[in-house]
Image (spheres, grey):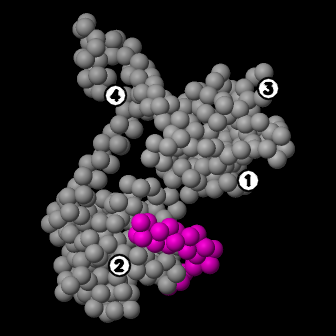
Amino acid sequence: MAFKDDVADLAKRAISAQAVAQTEEATKNAIVMPFLRVLGFDVFDPTQIIPEYVADVGLKKGEKIDYAVKIGDRIEYLVEAKAVSVSLRDAQYSQLFRYFHTSDANIAMLTNGLQIWFFTDLEAPNKMDANPFFKFDLLGYDENDLRELEKFHKANFSIDNIKAAASSLKYLRGAMAFIEKQWANPDEEFVRMAARDFYEGQLRASVIETMKPIVKRAFDDLFRQRALKRIDVAFDGGKEESLPEFNEAKVETTEEERQAFMIVRAIAAELVPVSRIAIRDGQSYCAILFDDNNRKPIIRLHFNAKTKFVTVFGADKEGVRHDVAGVEDIFGLREAIKAVVRSYQ
């Protein structure tokens, strides 16, 4: 529980630091060092944290990595920090690759204070993988992310456990990417494999083309059914969630609006904690907001008129209208909803 609270406090610090800690040095002081402290290290003890660590690599002399982190007598983590304003997708971190190869470290971390990417050497011994096996986002994490992050705490450190988890996460990420791809546009091989289980005739090319939209619909319906089963629980251990009451202006939040809210929450839960998705009802429409912020609308529900429709917002805050027959149709807007949630992260 203490670790969870420490991470929550760090997340609040990161939100505040976004506006002011624009340089790399400011980011390190405001977020990165407190992050290492959350992992159980004394950031002022040079036997644990070595700032500006120098490890000459080939012809390159005097280059420095931001932090080397020791557990016992061994350097286990290398940490390279970027300014909070830098997107890690665009960050250059070739220095981290070189240092990982020449050091004894098992784990490399790249961070801008908001996201922390974790690398190791699953592909080839002593050679840092090109892709991180785990990404932790202080502005959008869940209980599973916390459990993974806690494995890097000094008190829990076991490189065998971390590498086993890293391998599992790598394959999990690959499986999710494959399923996402097949969900969006199932290929012939996948459709053929699925159809063998229920189609009794010969799977000619014309049959496969007929089956493609059916398999895609099966993905959509399966997601819809599973999410609907969870609408009556609020992802809080099985207890029924009491949704906000709206009595100030005698606005009645209908059961249909509540169900739509829970569907949007279920979709957004793939990206952020559900607590960040809020509902605010009004006379003309019911708004679903990110962080309960009017300036961060996700979707508006217009269910009070004869023709029902919703407005889904984009990163530019422009709304797009979608007519719906019922709340289940919101599942069809899954990608648009996820896109706007991503834009607010």
> Badge 4 is on which residue?
187
Q: Is residue 225 left or right of residue 208?
A: right
Q: Are marks 3 and 2 in contact (CB under 8 Å)?
A: no
Q: Is residue 138 above or below residue 49?
A: above
Distance between the alpha carbons at the discs numbered 3 and 2: 56 Å
Q: Quadrant of the N terminus?
A: bottom left
* Element type where label 4 sits in the image: loop
Give the distance between the C-alpha atoms of the residues marked 4 and 1, in whole angstroms: 41 Å
> Which range is magenta?
1-26
Judging by the rendered image, the residue that carries numbered circle 2 is 40
Q: Earlier in the sequence, mark 1 or mark 3?
A: 1
In the image, residue 83 lies in the stretch drawn in magenta? no
Mark linked to residue 294: 1
Q: Is residue 262 left or right of residue 135?
A: right
- Of residue 110 and residue 159, the one placed in the foreground of this image is 159
Q: How many marks?
A: 4
Circle nearer the viewer, 4 or 3: 3
Reading the image, the residue beneath label 3 is: 305
* Residue 300 image offset from top left, x and y in percent: 71, 39
Main secondary structure type of the part rendered in magenta:
helix
How far separated are the C-alphas under marks 1 and 2?
38 Å
Of mark 3 and mark 2, the one earlier in the sequence is 2
Q: CA distance from mark 2 to mark 4?
A: 47 Å
* Label 2 Cα crowd, 10 Å radius (few <14 / some 14-19 / many 20+): some
Amino acid beneath label 3 = Ala
Percent of width and height locating residue 46: 32, 93
In-image side of 57 versus 321 (left or right): left
- Residue depicted at 33% across the width and 11% down the height: 207
Report the mark closest to the observer, 4 or 1.
Answer: 1
- Near mark 3 (Cα within 10 A), the count class, few <14, some 14-19 or many ≥20, is few
Residue at image position (35%, 60%) is 147
Assign a secondary structure to mark 2.
loop
